[in-house]
Image: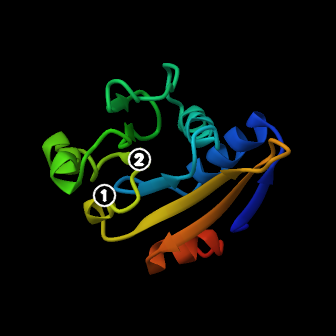
Amino acid sequence: MRREHVLPTPADTRALGAALAGVVSAGDLIVLVGPLGAGKTALTQGLGEALGVREPVTSPTFVIARVHRGGRLPLVHVDAYRLGGVADVDDLDLDASTDESVTVVEWGQGLVEQLADEHLEVRLDRRDDDVRTAVLVPHGPGWEQRLDGEPR
């Protein structure tokens, strides 16, 4: 899987999420980094759809975390924007569901990496021409292998 992506439309961003669904497994942590409007929720929507999640995946801004079931794997979608620190993350008890789910955290950089031994960081940005970009940054050999297309 390529590490750098140009995403001209929201559909392209969702397609990247769908592609990630093909390499995720239970226990995976994906940390989405980027400014408001960069495509974090659109990417998660594509991931959820490709996993077979039945209900709509929407931004969890006001509820902080949502669990979507019914697909190949449960999807835990977290918005860490309003969390004050690692203690707030601990209060959410996310580690109770990380082993059997794919956990996607928007705005989680520096807050949630301790939830898993390895994680994938997806750096999203929105250019002046409204085109989004994504850079996939693996943290750990497992993610390196998956992004390089090696068997697990």
- Vertical relation: 140 (above or below) 61: below
Q: In the depicted view, which residue is nearer to us: 72 or 87?
A: 87
Quadrant in which residue 69 is drawn: top left
* Farthest residue, direction top: 55
- Measuring from the top left, give residue 102's x and y in whole percent: 40, 48
Indicate the secondary structure of the residue bearing disc 1: loop
Left or right? Give the position of 37 relative to 109: right
Q: Is residue 45 above or below residue 140?
A: above
Q: Identify the residue at horizontal 48%, vertical 19% (top origin).
A: 55
Residue 52, image x, y percentages: 54, 31
Label 2 crowd bin: few (<14), some (14–19), many (20+), radius 10 Å? many
**Amino acid type, mark 1:** Leu
Which residue lies most toward the front here? Answer: 128
Q: Give the residue displayed 58% in from the left and 33% down from the top.
A: 45
Residues 38 and 71: in front is 38
* Image position, residue 15 (x, y; %): 72, 42
Q: Residue at x 73, y 67 (%)?
A: 2
Does dot 2 land on a helix, a strand or a loop?
Answer: strand
Lower position in the chain sequence, tag 1 or tag 2: 2
The residue under label 1 is 111
Report the residue marked by disc 2.
105
The residue sitting at 69% across, 68% down in the picture is 3
> Closer to the observer: label 1 or label 2?
1
Task: Left or right? Give the position of 136 relative to 78.
Answer: right
Identify the amino acid type marked 2. Val
Mark 1 in CB contact with mark 2 (< 8 angstroms): yes
